[in-house]
């Protein structure tokens, strides 16, 4: 067949030139069709030898046709060509073979005709949020927001042009509606699925329970939305029954177990968030749904399974509301070979909204990290075998009953029990040795300089544990080989296999940990943790140093539209830092829109930004004493109604100790992070308008306290990452090795982004009014300090001595 019947002249010229540049060897290219069905654009992605070339499966999804040449001029497909063409054809991608001159083409598989996508009508969609529009009419106290409409126009373009958008939308812009209205309209008129991913459960719930129903009520076409959480958030009825049957599995947890049993009868979703009480972590881990412990079609509770019901709902939905961790779990499985056309963790999709996108690097780092610890391994071993007095409990005794009267079975069981006992002792020794090495440090990074210490004191125990765990797994699997076929689908057998796979995974992590010196792309460290009984244990962690390439390939390259939205994506009006950390800077074949959409709130009138010029430098001993004095004085002026944010628990505890008594005498209640779980602590703070919350880290974002609940935010220190953060330090070192400036390219922009988040806690409604005080005067005394100030909205300012700042704070709060 003449190539001109299938290619445009430009495509023929491009492909011919590429083949010549490859010295007439084979090339592998992606072909993109014109509306008339001809290949109009060619993108070469691999070059090979005279008789072979790599046909990269990760690239197929982007193409309409896979193209390669046969230098011999003999175009009949080889067996390998047929295999590749068949696999590509399954996802609708065609396959062509051409000669080196691109004058003749052999069509192996015809491409599937492209489904026409109906673009969004910009004016019609935008009109819904203008005065009198379908959405605007349903919003109480509606005010037109030009920034919101501008953001919506950019998002509509992104859907219509298959582009990526990076949008910084200030507080009050209404970013949720700005992307929900176009997303739901696009999904409805084109019958496509769109995933909306958030970093916090709070936003997930708000979108699903409040915002999406409101938008749906204004639409003519119905759009089904489903809230999807990670599998372990759902109750497994089979595992609950197992736990009830064992009864004495949980010391002191019997009451919680029976409460779960009662709740299981009434709940419609089985979601942990709907529980009327907070279950013990160990108890919930025993009864929640887990992929490697699922019996699938063999499960006796399959018809009532909460997770399967959720999956069925998700397959029929057009909008899926997920969290970042779940999104990455799905993307990782697809990238590792599951493909993009099948249901994996989520049903297939090709358009994504990433809300709270500033957290994407941290979320990806967390997902791609691996760890092991004594408590985690003891949980798995305890499920297999444990003794309680004269009783032997766990799954291995049940396995023994399935094996029947095999000779010396009791002896084998006792031997396995002894092995598990030895492993328990090894885990105790490992923890004690690790804690001794760490000394007073809470985090201990493994480095080449510490190699001798680790090799002498820690690694021998780890190697011994690795051998013992491997031997235990092998022996149990040998036992299971003696089972009769009728027991292969037994749920006890299935769960044992799942536990053995988990132990295998932890054993692999131990191997990686031991090999840390040779893994330049990974950082390893030990982290001190404290159990509920006050005992210390160590978490051994491995994290990727750079997730940008994973994000570029797994998220941005393969999806037609990706919207990145957040209140904080820029540093001094530049997206450069976000592009570098998210992987967007690695893209060269995607259209990217970016823009800032300022808050409509009257910051210049409603907010006072203050900083004491006479405060001691944060790197001097006098600084903490100043903070401990300044915080209660500021809080007494505001009458509470404040959020005090720190960068360390030690500084938090010190200021809290000095403030709690004097403020209590004034009738001001103080709450401290760590005293209760985050959601309960926030709820109590929001319910008491005069209260004060002392917090760190995660509370710099995600706190929504409008009105008089929050009139003062104190940022005690600029939020530079602490020196003992191992991932951050490894990233600094990697930047330095590449000739970059770690402070300017990483430390400073990251700190500015978090600073903006902390500042943003104050103003949550247009009627809010209050003061943000920064006790760290580096923002006015250091050259780089101007970057922090320039990254904030325009406000009233008081950069003066502390006594003047106190007076102006009082005058501003009580005009």
Image (cartoon, rainbow, N blue to C red):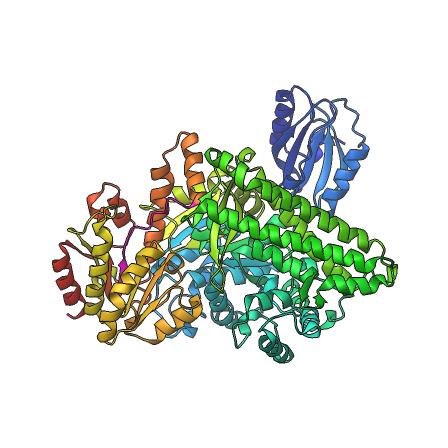
**Residue 464 occupies quadrant:** top right
Instruction: Tell me the residue at 51%/52% (across/down).
Output: 538
Residue 608 falls left or right of residue 234: left
Residue 236 position in % (x across, y down): 66, 68
Compared to residue 580, the image places residue 715 above or below, namely below
Q: Residue furthest front?
A: 390
Q: Is the magenta stretch mostly helix, strand or loop?
A: loop
Magenta run includes residue 544: no
Magenta run includes residue 713: yes
Q: Quadrant of the N terminus?
A: top right
Whether residue 561 is visible, yes or no, is no
Residue 308 position in % (x across, y down): 68, 66
Q: Which of 9 and 21 is in front in this view?
A: 21
Q: Nearer the viewer, residue 220 or 429?
A: 429
Q: Which of 390 and 763 is in front in this view?
A: 390
Residue 229 falls left or right of residue 772: right
Q: Quadrant of the C terminus?
A: bottom left
Span of residues in magenta: 712-725
Whether residue 430 is visible, yes or no, is yes
How many marks overall?
0
Compared to residue 550, the image places residue 127 above or below, namely below
Instruction: Tell me the residue at 70%/60% (across/down).
Output: 384
Residue 4 falls left or right of residue 656: right
**Residue 572 occupies quadrant:** top left
Residue 780 position in % (x across, y down): 20, 47
Residue 286 position in % (x across, y down): 63, 66
Residue 324 falls left or right of residue 377: left
């Amino acid at each position: 067949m003449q190539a001109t019947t299938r290619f445009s002249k430009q495509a023929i010229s491009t492909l011919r030139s590429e083949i010549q540049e490859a010295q007439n060897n084979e090339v592998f290219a992606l072909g993109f069709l014109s509306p008339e069905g001809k290949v109009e654009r060619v993108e070469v992605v691999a070059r090979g030898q005279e008789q072979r070339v790599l046909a990269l499966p990760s690239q197929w999804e982007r193409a309409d046709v896979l193209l390669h040449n046969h230098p011999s001029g003999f175009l009949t497909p080889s067996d390998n060509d047929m295999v590749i063409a068949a696999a590509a054809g399954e996802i609708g991608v065609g396959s062509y073979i051409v000669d080196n001159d691109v004058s003749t083409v052999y069509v192996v598989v015809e491409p599937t005709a492209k489904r026409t996508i109906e673009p969004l009508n910009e004016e019609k969609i935008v009109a819904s949020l203008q005065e009198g529009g379908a959405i605007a009419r349903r919003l109480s106290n509606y005010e037109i927001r030009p920034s919101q409409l501008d953001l919506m126009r950019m998002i509509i373009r992104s859907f219509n042009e298959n582009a990526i958008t990076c949008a910084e939308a200030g507080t009050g812009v209404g970013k949720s509606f700005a992307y929900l209205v176009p997303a739901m309209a696009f999904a409805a008129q084109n019958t496509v699925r769109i995933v909306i991913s958030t970093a916090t459960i709070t936003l997930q719930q708000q979108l699903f329970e409040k915002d999406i129903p409101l938008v749906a009520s204004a639409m003519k076409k119905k759009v089904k939305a489903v809230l999807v959480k990670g599998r372990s958030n759902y109750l497994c009825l089979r595992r609950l029954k197992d736990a009830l049957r064992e009864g004495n599995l949980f010391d002191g947890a019997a009451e919680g177990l029976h409460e779960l049993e009662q709740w299981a009868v009434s709940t419609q979703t089985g979601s942990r968030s709907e529980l009327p009480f907070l279950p013990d972590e160990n108890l919930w881990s025993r009864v929640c749904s887990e992929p490697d412990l699922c019996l699938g079609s063999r499960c006796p509770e399959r018809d009532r399974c909460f997770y399967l019901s959720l999956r069925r709902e998700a397959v029929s939905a057009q909008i899926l509301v997920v969290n970042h961790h779940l999104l990455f779990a799905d993307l990782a499985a697809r990238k590792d070979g599951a493909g993009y056309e099948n249901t994996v963790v989520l049903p297939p999709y090709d358009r994504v909204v990433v809300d709270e996108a500033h957290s994407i690097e941290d979320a990806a780092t967390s997902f791609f990290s691996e760890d092991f610890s004594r408590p985690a391994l003891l949980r798995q071993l305890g499920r297999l075998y444990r003794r309680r007095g004269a009783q032997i409990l766990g799954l291995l005794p049940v396995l023994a009953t399935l094996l029947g009267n095999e000779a010396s079975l009791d002896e084998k069981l006792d031997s396995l029990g002894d092995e598990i006992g030895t492993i328990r002792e090894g885990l105790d020794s490992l923890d004690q040795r690790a804690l001794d090495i760490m000394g007073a440090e809470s985090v201990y990074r493994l480095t080449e300089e510490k190699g001798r210490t680790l090799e002498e004191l820690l690694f021998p125990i780890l190697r011994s544990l690795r051998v013992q765990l491997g031997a235990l797994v092998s022996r149990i699997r040998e036992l299971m080989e003696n089972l009769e076929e009728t027991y292969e689908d037994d749920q006890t057998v299935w769960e044992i296999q799942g536990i053995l796979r988990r132990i295998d995974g932890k054993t692999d992590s131990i191997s990686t940990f031991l090999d840390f010196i040779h893994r330049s792309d990974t950082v390893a460290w030990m982290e001190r943790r404290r159990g509920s009984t006050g005992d210390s244990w160590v978490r051994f962690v491995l994290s990727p140093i750079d997730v940008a390439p994973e994000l570029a390939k797994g998220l941005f390259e393969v999806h037609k539209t990706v919207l990145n939205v957040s209140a904080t994506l820029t540093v001094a009006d530049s997206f450069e830092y976000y592009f570098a950390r998210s992987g967007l800077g690695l893209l060269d074949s995607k259209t990217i829109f970016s823009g800032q959409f300022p808050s409509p709130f009257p910051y210049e009138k409603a907010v006072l930004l203050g900083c004491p010029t006479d405060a001691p430098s944060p790197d001097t001993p006098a600084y903490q004493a100043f903070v401990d004095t300044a915080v209660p004085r500021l809080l007494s002026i505001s009458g509470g109604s404040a959020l005090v944010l720190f960068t360390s628990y030690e500084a938090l505890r010190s200021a809290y100790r000095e403030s709690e008594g004097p403020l209590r005498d004034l009738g001001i209640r103080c709450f401290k992070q760590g005293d209760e779980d985050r959601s309960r602590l926030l709820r109590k703070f929001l319910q008491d308008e005069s209260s004060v919350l002392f917090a760190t880290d995660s509370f710099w974002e995600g706190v929504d306290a409008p009105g008089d609940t929050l009139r003062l935010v104190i940022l005690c220190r600029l939020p530079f990452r602490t020196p003992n953060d191992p991932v951050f330090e490894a990233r600094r070192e990697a930047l330095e090795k590449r000739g970059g400036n770690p402070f300017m390219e990483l430390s400073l922009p990251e700190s500015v982004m978090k600073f903006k988040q902390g500042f943003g806690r104050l103003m949550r409604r247009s009627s809010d009014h209050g003061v943000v005080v920064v006790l760290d005067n580096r923002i006015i005394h250091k050259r780089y300090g101007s970057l922090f100030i320039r990254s904030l909205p325009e406000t009233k300012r008081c950069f003066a001595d502390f006594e003047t700042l106190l007076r102006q704070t009082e005058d501003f709060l009580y005009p």
